[in-house]
Structure formats: C-alpha cells, structure tokens
Amino acid sequence: MHGDELTFVARQDPLTVWTLVDGDDSSLYLLSGFHVVNRIGYLVSSVRLPLDRSHRVRLESVADAREG
C-alpha cells in the first residue's frame, strides 16, 4: 500500500485503524493500530477503540475450521 491509499489511512483517527498482518506462524492477524512490519493492508472502522486498549485477533482459515 502506498500513495493515495496510504495517505488516506494516515489521515484517519489512529484509534479506528486496524492492520492486517502476516504472522510468524503463517496465520493472518488483525492488529489494532497502524503497523508496518508484515503488513498486508489496513482497515478503518467506524468505531474508535478505547485509548487504553489494543487488540490482536488471529483470523481462522478454512483449513483451521475443518481441523477444529
């Protein structure tokens, strides 16, 4: 992501930005906030995260769901 897309995300309220990253365990994660390392892309929510909170959400793949 670069150019206009990155400019758009950088202008958003940081408490509404989530980063999709490729984890070290080959899983995908959504991290609250603006991150650069292993970044795949960004999502901007309409709801602000409380200032004192951060979240890390592992996204389950179809293969994970079948195994579980």
Image (tube, grey):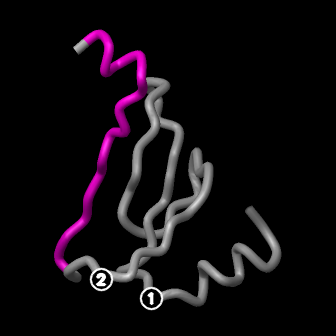
Quadrant of the rendered image containing residue 13 = bottom left
Query: Which secondary structure lies at badge 1?
Result: loop
Closer to the camera in the image, 6 or 60: 60
Residue topped by disc 2: 48
Q: In the rendered view, would you say 40 is above or below 12?
A: above
The residue carrying pointer 1 sits among few (fewer than 14), some (14 to 19) or many (20 or more) residues within 10 Å by Cα, namely few
- Residue at the spot 38% in from the left edge and 82% down from the top edge: 46
Residue beneath the point at 62% across and 49% down = 40
Q: For the residues marked 1 and 2, what is the alpha-carbon distance in whole angstroms?
A: 8 Å
Q: Residues within 10 Å of mark 2 (few under 14, many from 20)?
A: few
Q: Position of residue 64 (x, y in %)?
A: 34, 19
State left or right for residue 18 relative to residue 15: right
67 displayed left or right of 4: left
Q: Which residue does the numbered mark 1 point to in the structure image?
A: 13
Q: Which mark is residue 50?
A: none
Look at label 1 and name its amino acid.
Asp
Residue 65 is covered by the magenta coloring: yes
Q: Is residue 19 located in the magenta-colored stretch of the structure?
A: no
Kind of residue at disc 2: Arg
- In the image, which residues are magenta? 52-67
CB contact under 8 Å: marks 1 and 2? yes
Residue 35 left/right relative to 15: right
Work out which quarter of the rendered image holds the C terminus and state it: top left
* Residue 12 at x, y percent in the picture: 52, 87
